[in-house]
Amino acid sequence: MSLFDYKVSDLHELLHKRELKVSDLVDESYKRIAQVEDKVQAFLTLDEERARLTAKSLDEKLNTDVTKGLLFGMPIGLKDNMVTKGLRTTCASKILENFDPIYDATVVQKLQQAETVTIGKLNMDEFAMGSSNENSRFQKTRNPWNLETVPGGSSGGSAASVAAGEVLFSLGSDTGGSIRQPAAFCGVVGLKPTYGRVSRFGLVAFASSLDQIGPITRTVEDNAYLLQAISGLDPMDSTSAPVEVPNFASALTGDVKGLKIAVPKEYLGEGVSESVRQSVLDALKVLEGLGAVWEEVSLPHSKYALATYYLLSSSEASANLARFDGVRYGYRAPDAESLMELYKKTRAEGFGEEVKRRIMLGTFALSSGYYDAYYKKAQQARTLIKKDFEDVFEKYDVIVGPTTPTPAFKIGEKIDDPLTMYVNDILTIPLNLAGLPGISVPCGFDGGLPLGLQIIGKHFDEATVYRTAHAFEQATDFHKQKPRL
Amino acid sequence: MSRISTDQVKHVANLARLAVSEEEVEKFTKQLDAIISFAEQLNELDTENVEPTYHVLDLKNVLREDIPKQGLPREEVLKNAPEHQDGQIKVPSILGE
């Protein structure tokens, strides 16, 4: 039994009654890391000294009457693409290997206000480009359910650390599925919020029109609490949305009577494994049993989402990653004779293969003579994909399907063929293109590996997504299973 | 038919400020060709009167008051610079011979 088998609300109560100290939670975290980290390899940097100091000062506060928020004292892990002042932030790239940020990302500041304790920074695919964590320049995180398989990506460390009980919860980022896919592979709950719900200030940008930070947790309830803490308009991010943040936890009523669910036929079609299809059909029966109704619908432009995504995300990445030039921060190649040579050598040595491939693709799609044929065409396709969702949401409350076409694959299985690897994200990408919120919740197992159910909502309607996910979770016990490590 | 040539790959690498070996040029040519061939399925779509989506939110011209604020301290900013001298970031000569 681990402390992290308790929900946030239970731990909060134990702290409140002084039956537990923040130091106990932090001890639990580092103790578990010492036990399993050589197998899981989720962390790139630990912040142990500072975490213990923070725990100590929070414990002093525990003995006073000062109001403590719900997340007070909770140990959290952060994907290593959110900048943390005085704590190395690498994006799992050689080009930022020794980067020591001089400010905190907005989400990090918000967590400080909520008085969580940062345990360390988590592994990812380099610059969040990848679906397996194999593109990290430093280490390969493993799936706690089967150490031969990938944890998914790019937030693989974020999902694996929660599944392995190393932290209570974590933050990941999602550009084309990078929270939901690893959450599905690792049997935990991961939500990509509506684009604009959470500030991106201090999130190292991959594709600015798609990126969004979100929570990875063991339960839907904890997920709602963590999202609550990080949401909201931020003057430092002009694309954060000026909309009210509702109380997400109050949506967790367990009541889905009359909920109208759309199931896109394209999400259960070709390429989706039988076990995945069956788990989704079983999940729909569970929801039906709770009073929801579902119908098959069509999102006719789904098949174009993958090509659209790779053109747009790579184009945006090629612009965003231009800042890594060896001048102001990060790695600088030695012995360059001219500024041009400095740029070229620094970037050639600093970036890994997948990052270079996407910079090349993006630069090509934006280059003179090709812009209209590729970049603009993809922007128009994006409009059609977004319209598909708008049409369905006129009649339905949520869209339900699988998170991934298959359970986690073996390490090394897909790394040599970029296109095969990309196909893995085919069910998660359309949401990012449309800016919609989506969650992955555990819904079954295949050969001992977890499967994820994806629930998609309308813009800024995370509440209904949570309500559906929570009702399903409470009616099943997939989330109670734990990997044996 | 190949959609992309080795010369194009070298041109793009130069635009992207990436030094590439002959071996990498070969590899990127093949891989980009495969990805771009795949992407050409978008040509099946009639996008004649379709507006491009640059951004999913209906936000336009987000403005704020122009209030002067303290910037980051110079020592802090220089902390991560690979080379600096006299409070300034140093780079190799930018003027040719």
Image: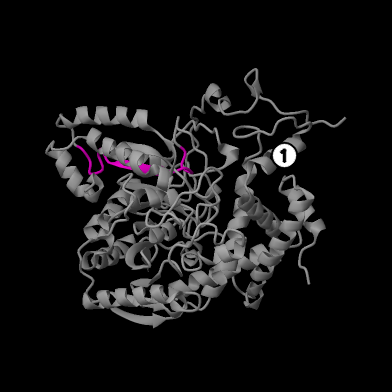
Quadrant (top left/top right/bottom left/bottom right) for the N terminus of chain B: bottom right
Question: What residue is disc 1 on?
Answer: A345
Amino acid at dot 1: Lys
Give the magenta-colored segment's residue range. A68-83
Above or below A59: residue A262: below
Residue occupying the far bottom of the picture: A296
A440 and A110: which one is in front? A440
Give coordinates of residue B53: x percent, y percent. 56, 64
Give coordinates of residue A285: x percent, y percent. 27, 78
User: Is residue A457 in sight in this rendering?
Assistant: no
Residue occupying the far top of the picture: B86
A195 and A354: which one is in front? A354
Above or below A98: residue B46: below
Give coordinates of residue A10: x percent, y percent. 17, 48
Q: Chain of mark 1?
A: A
Q: Is residue A86 magenta?
A: no
Quadrant (top left/top right/bottom left/bottom right) for the C terminus of chain B: top right
- Report the residue at 71% width, 28% height from top: B91
Q: Is residue A70 magenta?
A: yes
- Report the residue at 39% width, 82% height from top: A296
Give coordinates of residue B62: x percent, y percent. 49, 49
- Per the picture, the main secondary structure of the magenta-coloured stretch is loop
* Quadrant position of residue B95: top right
User: Is residue A222 in sight in this rendering?
Assistant: yes
A458 and A49: which one is in front? A49
Q: Callout 1 environment at 10 Å: few (<14), some (14 to 19), or many (20+)?
A: many
